[in-house]
């Protein structure tokens, strides 16, 4: 059983993953893409290589754990946290710990191996966003759990262990420290100014323009003023909302477009970089909050994190966000790609949006 | 001029290093060791390839910026922060910024290219510790500056851009957020319990033993209870002290031995891993503090940081610290290596400690 342990100084929790346990020898060879299995467990037709699916968006008439899906959610085969058991919070001398209860799921975004999130048509990206939403709504019902972190690791430098396009969801029984810091910081601003800091940022970015990458109906994409990383890009809803899972349908429609544009701009600007994106959203147990504002942070992994960053929490960014945004703004992403409907998908299974376009 | 910018939500500062500015093309090729210059600027005899030295421990009769040194401190050729100018703190709409004033120095720990920190004899490690101390004491006099972060990046995965053994010192005009979090957390504990949390940790670790790597006269080395990384090892003084630069001579004598042991244990256990170490110490402008305790964190870089860690501040560690410590404890580091005195160093220039041993 994994354990959650708390650092008694800064209050950071770590997951000690006994069952992923490694011996020193496991670290002796440099990890590389050659660890990739010969047969991809995420490809259509190999459904038996993953644990049984939790949810799938499937073509009419197809069966669970068989072909005919567009999107598939499965438990992580090597989960950082486990769903069974109780938290058993306890002390260990001066330290605090609890059982590693939680969920660790994988969202396979396409049945086809050669597709990437950037080459996925906008409507399929919208389905990815819907599946993110559906999983959060479902997991929120478990009152042992308080936070769902949705993230994507792309390419080796982004920490992806499998090439086939996928996101992950880790659901934890405590609020992660980084989220807690954002909540605390934005609450302080709200108490002082009576406004949401993210709404203020949106307003200033749209007014000064120089850090804006994309200005869409419902979202602003910009390189933040204090970007930690070159080409760091945030996608922030224009209307205040603290919980991603409450996103309205027109929001998903627009976000599919914005995410497609932003990822393709980064792919083109940086020649297929490693990157991560993370959805920052409010904890499950919070009502709609006036001070917190959900958003997506996209982080290309171009620079190395070394001793200074680990020790200080300071980042050295060699690319001013104004330069990065100007560069990304100019990049033309090709006209909408044709809608990919999956090899087994009859026309009758298309979404209304797709039928409207065809 | 570099700029310091503050994230308005969490209060984290970043350095926007205009003069290290990179264009998108600079990120297109994967960085690799082939960026290493053909002629090493840190080797003895190549002193003209670095900016003029700030300080050196030299053999009697040798001249500044020429051969005959054991340790040399030079400005970083591509400094993240600059020493000239004034802070010019100001607002930029809703944001806060100041000029990137500070210092960025390189400590070259040996004139010889093939030496590493682990193969450096204990007495030379002691000189490295003295030079760390001397630089902090000197830079503290500049009242624009409040924090000095000493760190070491080893091998490519640790972020080292040059192979020749060296440490770095970055001195900032504000307290780094990670240090501030440690100070705040330990103050809270002190206010509640009336004791230093690090002293409590030391006591518990020595009592339960299972996470102890080394128990020496003045220092405990242990794998912390909530280790973020496999084989993460902290070296903590047994006597309470908040400022590294006030370390007494017997402390330096012992720490040379402890650091030598710990680094060699890690080198042997993990087959020459990439790693960082960082000296965590109190800010310049603070008096001796009853709640904060300086220490060294050694972090082998074996696992990849991916989206989950960036988003959450949660870490997943596949090696329980109890396993790591048991493994490191058992490793025998060879008997003290012969004292390396440098190729140009006459016997008369040896330290009293060396003469005592010879």
Image (cartoon, coloured by chain):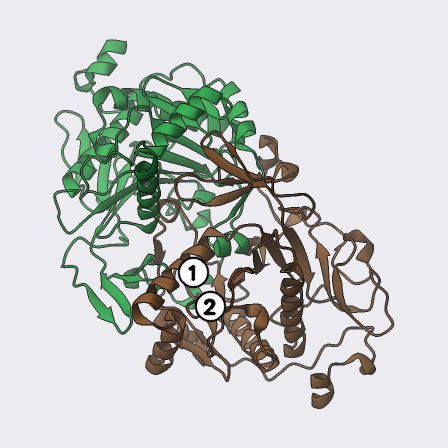
Chain colours: A green, B brown
- Compare residues A171 and B335 and report the one nearer the observer: A171
Residue shown at the point (22%, 22%) measured from the top left: A249
* Circle count: 2
Q: Quadrant of residue B41?
A: bottom right
**CB contact under 8 Å: marks 1 and 2:** yes
Left-right relation of B280 to B160 = left
- Compare residues A232 and B263 and report the one nearer the observer: A232
Q: Report, in whole angstroms, how far the alpha carbon at label 1 lies from the one at label 2.
A: 10 Å
Q: Chain of mark 2?
A: B
Q: Position of residue B301 (x, y in %)?
A: 48, 58
Instruction: Indicate which disc residue B183 carries.
Output: 1
The answer to whether any part of residue A15 appears in the image is yes
Q: Nearer the viewer, mark 1 or mark 2?
A: 2
Instruction: Indicate which disc residue A300 carries.
Output: none
Badge 2 density bin: few <14, some 14–19, many ≥20, Cα 10 Å? some
Query: Is residue A154 depicted above or below B163 in this figure?
Result: above
The answer to whether any part of residue A65 appears in the image is no
Q: Quadrant of residue B46?
A: bottom right
Residue shown at the point (37%, 26%) measured from the top left: A259
Q: Quadrant of residue A14?
A: bottom left
Query: Is residue A344 depicted above or below A63 in this figure?
Result: above
Quadrant containing the N terminus of chain A is bottom left
- Compare residues A349 and B54 and report the one nearer the observer: B54
Same subunit, tags 1 and 2: yes
Q: Position of residue B283 (x, y in %)?
A: 53, 60
Q: Secondary structure at mark 2?
A: loop
Earlier sequence position, callout 1 versus callout 2: 1
Q: Chain of mark 1?
A: B
Badge 1 density bin: few <14, some 14–19, many ≥20, Cα 10 Å? many
Q: Secondary structure at mark 1?
A: helix
The residue wearing badge 2 is B289
Quadrant containing the C terminus of chain A is top left
């Amino acid at each position: 059983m994994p354990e959650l342990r708390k650092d008694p100084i800064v209050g950071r929790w770590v997951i000690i993953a006994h069952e992923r346990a490694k011996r020193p020898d496991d670290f002796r060879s440099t990890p590389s893409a050659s660890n990739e299995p010969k047969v991809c467990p995420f490809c259509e037709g190999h459904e038996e290589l993953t644990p049984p699916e939790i949810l799938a968006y499937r073509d009419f008439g197809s069966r669970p754990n068989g072909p005919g899906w567009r999107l598939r959610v499965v438990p992580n085969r090597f989960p950082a946290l486990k769903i069974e058991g109780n938290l058993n919070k306890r002390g260990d001398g001066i330290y605090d710990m609890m059982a590693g209860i939680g969920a660790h799921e994988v969202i396979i975004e396409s049945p086809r191996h050669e597709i990437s999130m950037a080459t996925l048509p906008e409507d399929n990206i919208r389905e990815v966003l819907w599946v993110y939403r559906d999983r959060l709504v479902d997991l929120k019902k478990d009152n042992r759990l308080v936070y769902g972190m949705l993230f994507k690791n792309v390419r080796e430098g982004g920490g992806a262990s499998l090439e086939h396009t996928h996101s992950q969801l880790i659901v934890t029984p405590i609020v992660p420290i980084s989220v807690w810091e954002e909540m605390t910081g934005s609450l302080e601003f709200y108490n002082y100014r009576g406004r949401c800091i993210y709404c203020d940022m949106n307003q200033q970015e749209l007014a000064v323009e120089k850090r804006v990458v994309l200005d869409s109906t419902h979202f602003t994409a910009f390189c933040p003023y204090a970007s930690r990383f070159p080409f760091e890009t945030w996608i922030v809803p224009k209307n205040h909302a603290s919980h991603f899972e409450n996103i309205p349908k027109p929001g998903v429609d627009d976000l599919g477009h914005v995410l497609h544009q932003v990822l393709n701009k980064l792919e083109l600007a940086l020649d297929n970089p490693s990157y991560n994106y993370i959805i920052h959203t409010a904890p499950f147990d919070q009502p709609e909050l006036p001070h917190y504002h959900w958003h997506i942070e996209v982080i290309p992994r171009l620079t190395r994190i070394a001793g200074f960053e680990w020790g200080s929490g300071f980042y050295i960014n060699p690319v001013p966000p104004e330069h990065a945004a100007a560069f990304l703004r100019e990049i033309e992403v090709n006209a909408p790609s044709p809608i990919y409907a999956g090899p087994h998908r009859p026309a009758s299974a298309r979404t209304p949006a797709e039928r409207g376009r065809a």
